[in-house]
Every structure is written in C-alpha cells, then in structure tokens.
Image (cartoon, grey):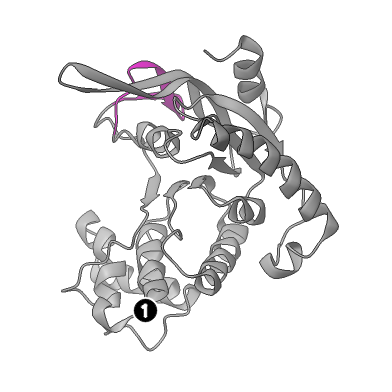
Amino acid sequence: MSSDSERQSSVAAGSNSGRLRIALRDVSKTFRFGETSLTAVESFSLDIYEGEFVCLLGPSGSGKSTVLNMTAGLLGASAGSVVVDGKTVSLNNFPDKIGYVFQRDTTYPWRTVWQNIGLGLELQGLRKDGRAERIVKAIKAARLEGFEDAFPTMLSGGMRQRVSLMRTLVMEPEILLMDEPFGALDAHTKLEMQRLLLEIWERQRQTVIFVTHDLAEALTLADRIVLLSARPGRFKQEFRVSFPRPRDAVRLRASHEYAELFSQIWNSLGEEIEKLNPQ
C-alpha cells in the first residue's frame, strides 16, 4: 500500500497553480477474469491544475493508461474517486470539455484529411461554414496544407498522427488526455510531433495528462512528471521540470540540467523496472 505521505505529496503538488481541474483520490482499479483478478492501480492520488502539462511515467504494466481511462470515464474505478471540474467521473459518465488522443492514429481510411479532422465538428452539428474555418486553421497548424483531399493510405505515419491530433484539438478541448500518442513513431518523427504539440500547447494551454514510457519525451514536454511504481501502480515520486519555455527538444537534451534530471529520474524508474525482473 502507498504511504499517507506519498499520497499527500501527490495531492499537494501544484496546489498554488490555479484552478483545480482533475482530482484523483485513493483511486484503485482491479480487473476480474472469472475467478482471477489483477489490480492495475492501487490507492493512487493526484491533483492537476489549470494549464498544467503532467506526464505519467512508469514501467510497462504500471497502470498509466488505466489512470487515464478512469479520468476519461472509459473505465470505472474499483475504489476511490475521480473528479473533473467538481463533477465525479464514473464509467460512461464522461467529463465535459475533454479530448482524448490514442496510442495509434485513429484516422478513417474512407475519409480525406479534411473530412477526418472535421468529423467531430460534423457530429456536433456545427454548420459547414463554421466547420471550414476551424478545419483550415487546424490544417495550417499541423502543416498539412496541400493534403486536404488525401486519404490516410497516402500519408506517412507521422502525418496520420497529426490528423488524429488535430481532429481532437479542433474540438477545442480544455483538458487533453494523451495515451502514448507518439510511441509508434520513429525517433525523428517523434521529435517533430513533440515540437508540434508544444507549439500548439504554448498557444492554447490546455490542461494535459500525457502517458509515456519515454523519459526523454516526458522531460521535453512536462511541467511535472509523476512516477508510478511497478504493478500495482502507486504514486512513487514526483519531479518538477523547470526548464524554461518555449522548449527546443534537440537543444534541451544537450544541456547539463537535462542530463542531471534525466539521471535522477532514471535511477528511480530503474528501481521499478528491476522489480519486474527479480533475480
């Protein structure tokens, strides 16, 4: 079980950062398969405030995506509570003003770039002229000009993920949940996507929870990194990332400050990874 001091540390973090948007209180999730069960997350607490960019980091199977899905209302908590903007979230009781970007691109192959990006606006019933204005801005922001009429099979993996990202952002969510959205990309494309995300976030300042197993990615993006223990995932440690913004991913990784913080977090993360492979 997590200690009270660990839970209080995670809850207290960011308490002077403005309006509380997301509050997880002693949240646990146990999956049951017939007569067997698996606890993915146990007694996890965390507060996230207006405009924060928080990365959840931990070894494989530590419950990062489970925390994200409980926050979105895609999974119900087995214990504890998830509150978004003062409203309790539960299974299929989705919070308002929230966007979700999944691990792989979720483009529809029969829809063009324009049609994919505008899908949510179309379902929302926004008039065609109103949709067009927002889609044009999204395509420009993602540097997809000239590909408006292209189908996903004509695009690279990075371009498809840009389409998926902009389909979410065009809905203007105030809270953005991202589940390893760049994990399947090659190193160069991943850096480009991180740069694009930071450019957009600097302008719009959504409240973000970003799940990753990539420490370098977390250091590039986050204001705070929350480290989860090996399964069952518990709050282990939090790290403030105080590198100045705007950030350049390449230059940042060449700095002494980056190397120091990377080493500190890596040592703590390594302790959890070792638990997965006991001697």
Q: Mark 1: few, some, or many residues within 10 Å (few <14, many ≥20)? A: few
Q: Position of residue 42 (x, y in %)?
A: 45, 19
Q: Amino acid at mark 1?
A: Ser
Q: Quadrant of residue 145?
A: bottom left
Q: Position of residue 41 (x, y in %)?
A: 42, 25
Residue 222 visible here: yes
Q: Which residue is mark 1?
A: 156
Asked whether residue 151 appears in the rendered view, the answer is: no
Span shown in magenta: 75-90
Q: Is residue 113 magenta?
A: no
Question: Which residue is outermost to the right?
Answer: 256
User: Is 19 in front, or is 94?
Assistant: 94
Please, is residue 163 above or below residue 209 in the view? below
Q: Residue at x 55, y 74 (%)?
A: 188
Residue at 70 percent across and 69 percent down: it is 250
State which quarter of the image contains the C terminus.
top right
Where does residue 197 sit, x and y in percent of width and height?
54, 62
Name which residue lies at 57% across and 68% down.
Answer: 191
The residue that appears at 63% across and 55% down in the rendered structure is 216
Taking 61 as reference, is 118 left or right?
left
258 above or below 109?
above
Task: Check disc 1 and report its element: helix, strand or loop.
Answer: loop
Residue 192 in the image: above or below residue 74: below
